Image (tube, rainbow, N blue to C red):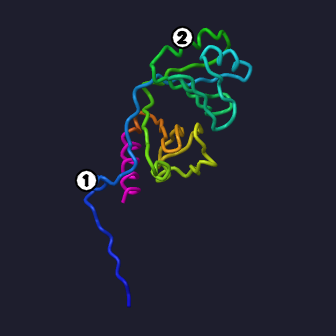
């Protein structure tokens, strides 16, 4: 005997609203964001000025209080300070050659949290997000759908997606849709 199986089709505005969704997609609080570029010989002075040791290995981060530094490349970091303190002023105290550009108004942060957050992000990100390959604290520049993002694993079940403001509506809607798909 042949078994027939039917998919339940939900209206797009009803999907994910049944209370079974285990992943939330929310906007991150406003933060100061600095794109920092410097040579290796400037790292100790910049670390001292920031009050945390700048990470120097791929996919690593460092945090102290509300301030975090994400390694983006051999000479590049994204500094995020959720206390909205004066990061640029602190960096000026380093008195070493560096470039610090405030990109606070260019970027938007989106938080994806809950059981299945990795599956939600993987809905549009080809990177291996298993804990072994992308442990807590890992960060990298990657893609989500058709846009470039910076992805940071804050905890086992929480990611922060940083994207340009002009792509934020796309990223937010993409992640919400992916969360609905994971919940179904």
Q: What whole-number distance in Å separates the C-alpha atoms at marks 1 and 2?
A: 46 Å
Q: Residue at x 67, y 28 (%)?
A: 75
Front residue of 67/11: it is: 67
Q: Residue at x 59, y 48 (%)?
A: 131
Q: How many marks?
A: 2
Q: Secondary structure at mark 1?
A: loop
Q: Position of residue 87 (x, y in %)?
A: 53, 16
Q: Position of residue 144 (x, y in %)?
A: 48, 46
Farthest bottom residue in view: 1
Q: Give the magenta range.
A: 169-184
Residue tagged 1: 13
Front residue of 130/146: it is: 130
Q: Residues within 10 Å of mark 1 (few under 14, many from 20)?
A: few
| Mark positioned earlier in the residue sequence (1 or 2) | 1
Q: Secondary structure at mark 2?
A: helix
Residue 171 part of the magenta segment: yes
Residue 180 lies, with reference to residue 66, above or below; the image says below
Q: Position of residue 82 (x, y in %)?
A: 46, 24
Image quarter of the N terminus: bottom left
Image quarter of the C terminus: bottom left
Residue tagged 2: 89
Residue 129 lies, with reference to residue 46, above or below; the image says below
Farthest right residue in view: 41
Front residue of 13/98: it is: 13
Q: Position of residue 173 (x, y in %)?
A: 36, 46
Q: Residues within 10 Å of mark 2 (few under 14, many from 20)?
A: few
Q: Residue at x 46, y 48 (%)?
A: 117
Judged by its main secondary structure, the magenta piece is helix
Q: Which mark is residue 90?
A: none
Front residue of 76/5: it is: 5
Asked if the residues shown at circle 1 and circle 2 are in contact, with their CB atoms under 8 angstroms apart, the answer is no
């Amino acid at each position: 005997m042949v078994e027939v199986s039917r998919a339940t089709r939900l209206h797009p505005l009803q999907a994910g609203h049944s209370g079974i969704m285990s992943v939330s997609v929310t906007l991150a609080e406003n933060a100061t964001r600095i794109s920092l570029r410097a040579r290796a010989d400037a790292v100790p002075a910049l670390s001292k000025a920031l009050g945390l040791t700048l990470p120097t290995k791929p996919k690593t981060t460092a945090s102290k209080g509300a301030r975090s530094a994400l390694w983006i490349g051999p000479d590049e970091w994204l500094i995020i300070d959720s206390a909205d303190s004066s990061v640029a002023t602190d960096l000026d105290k380093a008195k070493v050659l560096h470039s610090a550009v405030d990109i606070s108004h260019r970027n938007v942060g989106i938080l994806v949290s809950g059981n299945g957050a990795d599956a939600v992000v993987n809905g549009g990100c080809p990177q291996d997000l298993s804990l072994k390959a992308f442990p807590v604290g890992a960060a990298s520049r990657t893609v989500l759908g058709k846009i470039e993002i910076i992805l940071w694993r804050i905890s086992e079940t929480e990611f922060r997606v940083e994207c340009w403001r002009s792509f934020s509506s796309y990223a937010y809607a993409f992640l919400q849709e992916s969360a609905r798909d994971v919940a179904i």
